[in-house]
Amino acid sequence: MTFAVRIAPEAAPLDAALARLRPVAPIAARSAGRALGAALSNMRRSRSPEIAWRASSLTNTGFPVEMSWSSRDSSVRWTSEASGPDTPEGERLGHALQVLQGLGVNTGVPDWLMPQTGQALRFGAWVSGRHDGEGDRYKLHVDMAGAELPVDLLRPSILHSIPSRIVWRMAGIDGSAGTVELYGRLQKPEIWETERLLIRCGLHVNAVIDLASHLTGRPCEDYLLPGDAGLSLATLDGRLVAAGFFVQAGPMLGGDETVSRKLRELARRYGWDTAIYEAMLGNGAPDRTGRHGMIGFGVTEEGKPWLQVGLRP
C-alpha cells in the first residue's frame, strides 16, 4: 500500500518524491514516510477534504508539505502542517505537540512562545523532520505572533546587534539538540548591519556576502539583499550557533532552472553533495514548475557556509 493510498490520493506527489529518494537514501526515505504519515494524520479527518491539500502557506500551491535539502548533511528533510485548514487556531499548537509525542518526542514550549488568548496566528504550528542513517530528529515550529524575545535567550551584545526593525514571525524548537531557531522578516538588509551582527556573534561575514552575491547575481554594495528577506538565528545556551538569511525563489533569484544552476554552481565551489537535492527535484518536467520555495544561506559558528532550499513535492 502506497503512502498516498494510506493518507489521501492528493498525497501522490509525496509518494513520487519518496520513491525518488529511496535509491539514494533508503533508510532515511522510509523513516520520512512513516513520520509524514503521522504528521498528516489529521488531514484525513479534515471536514474540508476538498481544500485540505491546497490551503497551506507552506508552498505556493497550498500543498501541506515542503521537502528540503541542506548542504549541512545528507538528511531527508521535510516540514508539514499538523492539522487541517478547518482546525481552530487555538488548537493547532496542541495538534502539533500530539504529532511529535506520537513520534516519541516530548517538546516543551517556553512561556514566551505560548500564544495569548484571542491572538491571531499567521502560521499556527508546524512540525518538521530530519532523517539519515543515524536516526531521526524533529522540530516544532511555533508562530511567534508578536512575542518578544526574552532577555536571557541571547547575550546582550547579540541582542543589541539584531536590527530593531525586524518583525519576528516564527520559532523552531529542537528539544533533542536544545536549540531555538528564530525566524524574522527584514526589509532590504544592509551590509553594515549584517557585518555588525555576524562579527559581534563571532561569525564570518565574507561567506555570507559571497553566497548572497552569487544567488542574486549582483554585487553586495549597500544591501546584502535588494528586497524583503528573512533572518534566521539558531541559539543554544545563550550563544548563536548559526545565522543566515532566506528569500523566496522567484523575482529575486529566478525560476526553477536558474535557481538549480546557481545551486549546483555553489555546490561545486564548496564541495557539497547534491544527491538528495537531485532526487527531490526529479525530472523538472514543464508541469512541475515553481518547485523551489524558500532559499536560505548563512554560516555556522565553526565558520562553515551553508545553503538550504525548500522544494514542493
Image: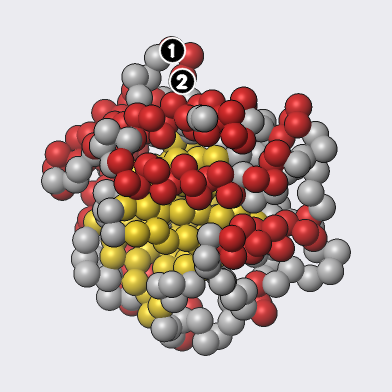
What residue sits right under mark 2 in the picture? 289
Q: Residue at x 55, y 40 (%)?
A: 65
Task: Find residue 140 and report its horizontal and vertical position in percent.
Answer: 56, 62
Task: Find residue 154 and report its horizontal and vertical position in percent.
Answer: 46, 81
Q: Secondary structure at mark 2?
A: loop
Q: Residue at x 46, y 54 (%)?
A: 129
| Distance (Cα) linking label 2 and label 1 | 6 Å
Task: Find residue 169 and report its horizontal and vertical position in percent.
Answer: 61, 59
Task: Find residue 177 and report its horizontal and vertical position in percent.
Answer: 40, 72
Compared with 221, 50 (above or below) is above
Q: Who is closer to the viewer here, 164 or 29? A: 29
What residue sits right under mark 1 in the picture? 286
Name the side, left or right, on which 25 lies relative to 34. Answer: left
Compared with 42, 279 (above or below) is above
Q: Secondary structure at mark 1?
A: helix
Compared with 6, 145 (above or below) is below
Q: Who is closer to the viewer here, 310 or 218? A: 310
Identify residue type, mark 2.
Thr
Identify residue type, mark 1.
Pro
On the question of residue 154 being in view, the answer is yes
